[in-house]
Image: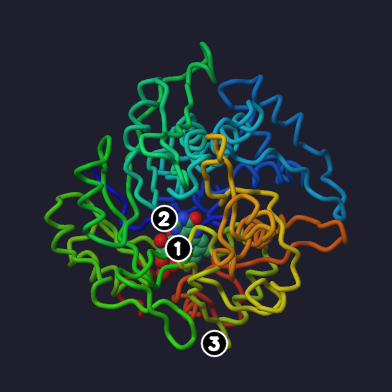
Amino acid sequence: MSHPIIVQGGMGVGVSDWRLARTVSQLGQLGVVSGALLAIVFARRLQAGDPGGAMRHAMDHFPIPSVAERVIEEYFVPGGKEPSAAFHLSALPALRPGPALVELMVAANFAEVFLAKEGHDGLVGINLLEKVQLTTLPSLFGAMLADVDYVLMGAGIPRSIPGVLDQFAAGAPAELRIDADGALPGEEFVSTLDPRAFCGDLLPKLKRPQFLAIVASATLAITLARKSNGRVDGFVIEGDVAGGHNAPPRGPLHLTAGGEPIYGPRDVPDLEKFRALGLPFWLAGSYARPDKLADAIREGAAGIQVGTAFAFCDESGIEPGLKRHICQLARTGNLSVFTDPLASPTGFPFKVLQMSDTLSEAGQYAARERFCDLGYLRQSYRKPDGTLGYRCPAEPVADYLRKGGVAEDTDGRKCLCNGLMASTGFGQIRSNGACELPLLTAGNDVAQLARFLKPGADSYTAADVVAYLLNPSAS
Ligand SMILES: Cc1cc2nc3c(=O)[nH]c(=O)nc-3n(C[C@H](O)[C@H](O)[C@H](O)COP(=O)(O)O)c2cc1C
């Protein structure tokens, strides 16, 4: 199989949306939608009145019309909700989600992939985070119902995903073991999804997508290649300068004077070992330059994965005013990121774009009331009665402690769910009428964003990025 040279990295929440992925795919590269919190993104687009009608159009093509009708009935607000009204909340992810939530998750992932693929025959992938386990099965199933070509997954060890793809492609039920803090030896918590129970006789034949694992080390890649429950088709090798979550440094965590994790020679991936695996790989993390693409190919890579350069282009899902402002800051060289070892409830280092009037400002975050009403980054834990509970270190501290969490885990944690959602223009309206402030992530490459801006312009397109990367004489 011939693979694309450029993978447009999956970017949550809602940053690599169907428009961006479709554009990149039409340019002959791999467009990747983000599956992170997609049910919320989809539900909020519908509540905002679905301008342009894309969500309803996708639902017209959903294989089970009764599900599409229920989702539209529940969330669509003709003309859009009042700007001062809060978004309606759906149930939080859980081990046994109710049917309405499963339908919403499957429909949302279907819609995003369906729209990204519509009207051309380019390739489209979906990106999911391994750490966000409770939504994985409905996300994968919805994406496969829309004939997704690639599944890309990082932020953890996605050993059980290839087998899930095989099961769904066979029309068979799939299971996923959920990591639960405090589980007793031998005790298992398993999430399940049965395609036939969901679709009945309307279950279409599903294609098994290619599976690419996103990793930071050859050790992890070797484990995945040998010990996954099915075929791994390749790797994205992501360095510590990449946007979003980063793998923690190997060994004990040491911080710079400014509080960022220190990465060293042991964190540099051993490409020789990747070449020896014989599977295609893409390099990611400040690779968005034609000379770096050439380096990657020389190193035996199939190409590169690029995030930051696409994150701020016209077609991405970041709120347009924020994007324009960021492009203006790029011109004056005023953009930087902080690799925050604490911010993410997942425990992985997370890159935060430093910007005024966003949650990257310590004062702004401190002023925010702690809230956990989306719950996608909650960690599962075993409750004393043997059932599964859910807690997030960014939720109100008293709630976290009541659930058996440790106080020090809550220090510096940030509500990425609400902050990232706000960066797409769908921030929740709180009871005092204020809108959640955005939190943005980007890779170190954001400091070089101005290379895409033509004189006098404060925006650029995905086509500008692709043309630049494929032009060997560009610098
Ligand atoms: C705004 C943004 C959001 C991201 N979100 C995700 C994500 O949800 N899942 C993921 O695997 N990678 C995520 N990434 C990482 C990208 O997919 C990509 O690997 C990375 O950005 C490549 O490095 P670069 O930013 O230097 O191009 C994100 C990156 C950015 C800039």
Q: Is mark 2 within 8 Å of ligand 1?
A: yes
Residue 466 seen from this side: no
> Residue sitting at 58 percent across and 52 percent down?
404
The residue lying toward the viewer, choosing from 140 and 471, is: 140
Q: Quadrant of residue 427?
A: bottom right
- Identify the residue position indicated by label 1 in the image: 348
Counting from the top left corner in percent of width and height, residue 94 is at 58, 37
- Identify the residue position indicated by label 3 in the image: 333
- Point out the image quarter for the C terminus: bottom left
Counting from the top left corner in percent of width and height, residue 379 is at 53, 49
- Report the amino acid beneath label 1: Phe
Residue 338 seen from this side: yes
Counting from the top left corner in percent of width and height, residue 107 is at 59, 33
> Residue sitting at 63 percent across and 56 percent down?
401
- Identify the residue position indicated by label 2 in the image: 155
Dot 3 falls on a residue whose secondary structure is loop
The residue lying toward the viewer, choosing from 354 and 468, is: 354
Q: Residues within 10 Å of mark 3 (few under 14, many from 20)?
A: some
Q: Is residue 370 left or right of residue 349?
A: right
- Report the amino acid beneath label 3: Gly
Cα distance between the residues tagged 2 and 3: 30 Å
Q: Are marks 2 and 1 in contact (CB under 8 Å)?
A: yes
Cα distance between the residues tagged 2 and 1: 8 Å
Q: Is mark 3 within 8 Å of ligand 1?
A: no
Q: Is mark 1 within 8 Å of ligand 1?
A: no
Q: Earlier in the sequence, mark 2 or mark 3?
A: 2
Q: Earlier in the sequence, mark 3 or mark 1?
A: 3
